[in-house]
Amino acid sequence: MKRLNAFVVPLVLVLAASALAQLAAGKKTYRSDNAVVHYSGVSDDYAKAFDRIAETARAAAIEDFGFDMPESISIEITTGGQTRLFTDGAGFLNLTIDSEKALHKPSESGVFNIYGVCHEIGHIAMYRPITDQSWMTTAAAEGWAHYLGSRLVDVVYKREGANLWPDRYDYRSDGGARLAREMKSPQPSDLTKGAALWQEFVGIVGDKGVAPVFSAWGKAAIDPGDPGAALRKALLATNSDARLGKWWNKAEPLFIERRPKSSIAKKTVDVSEVSDKPTELSKDDGTSAGMRSMAGTGHAVRFEAPDDNSYLTAVKIYGSRYGYPQAPAENFHVWLCDDTFKSIADFPQPYSSFERGDPTWVTLSITPTKVPRKFIICIGFSPTQTKGVMVHHDKKASGNSFMGLPGKPPRPFDGGDWMLRAVVSPLK
């Protein structure tokens, strides 16, 4: 049996605003007050059931847990591909199935669709207040969604009844009852261990005590090399219960993803101290063969400086922004990393640096910062379905382009080379 919660963030988003319009073309729509389902290849009854699940689970997240949820949950259902479900963490769910048979009861399809939607809404409840999840392990993020998703299944059954799903079955078995069975396993998975820790946490702070903690964590100034210190401080500031400290001692080793910084110290100089004859370093051939926006990860390229006295002065990216007409009032990140992909310096840049529409080369000015002979530039946009930047790549991969975020080994990108360049200058 498989839970329908694979391909949650991180995921590759290849849908810009124009692509979303194409995706919606030819689809039917079922809409309620706080949910909407765009669908094709499935019956109206299933679309209505998905809408009711999203509407009811969203309401429960607000009323029972006090989470700040989006005004509406949007679900796109497409047939004809590998079965998968993901969320952008902001309010959008995308479900792809091979055929309507994937919507049959789990005993026949092996897919837990009701639980899957509740699971993704659990992610949304967490990711809206905690926009930077880079410190979370899979056990933390997926464990929370498993815990809350299981509870939301029970709420949906209580409010919507036994006849919700067209291929009727007792879907209470997909909720808290299944989670309880998993917790009794002599060798529980990290997902189950994470869910168990979140259950213990809720037992301490109460259902409505979770949202204030998530909000505090989202506002905390977290050191990627040691996130635990700031998270502990923010946690204990929200609640004086002595049990929380003991709980965190158990949770931190399983929940925290440390991203150590480089041993190379950041060294900057004034722009007047560098040469006005820069060198542009590139791995791409200048011709776009595709574009991608990637949530939960970043675009990275490895370069080699022309000498030992080079300073990064700019980064150039070929791409365009998608989403709402007005750029979000937030920054994305440009990291200078050493050759092991550990961060030397972080240079936040405004989203408004990119315009919507046709792609173009965008030059981002950087405070002149010394680079090692071999270094990596990484860009992280933290995109969702409604905001992000499409970064283009060429056709042939040189082995110098990657996907990842600083502090962990990146994954090679074999689709080509990112059209991402570094501009370096020597000292005068």
Image (tube, rainbow, N blue to C red):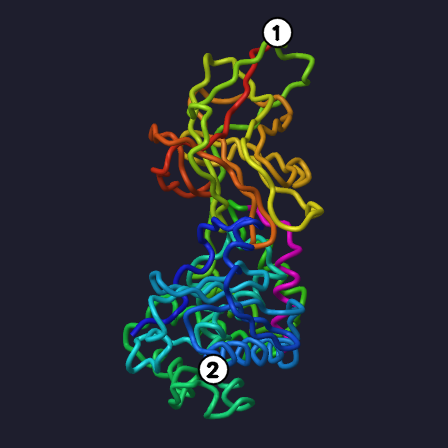
Taking the spot 48% from the left edge, 75% from the top edge, the residue there is 149
**Secondary structure mainly formed by the magenta segment:** helix
Q: Nearer the viewer, residue 187 or 166?
A: 166
Taking the spot 43% from the left edge, 59% from the top edge, the residue there is 253
Q: Can residue 35 be seen here?
A: yes
Other-residue count near label 1 (Cα within 10 Å), few / some / many at <14 / 14–19 / ≥20: few
Mark 2 secondary-structure assignment: helix
Identify residue for label 2: 45
Other-residue count near label 2 (Cα within 10 Å), few / some / many at <14 / 14–19 / ≥20: some
Q: Nearer the viewer, residue 323 or 350?
A: 323
Across and down, in percent, residue 261 comes to: 49, 38
Left or right: 235, with 135 as reference point: right
Tag 1: amino acid? Lys
Q: How many marks?
A: 2
Identify residue for label 1: 428
Displayed quadrant of residue 159:
bottom right
- Which corner quadrant holds the N terminus? bottom left
- Which corner quadrant holds the C terminus? top right
Residue range in magenta is 208-223
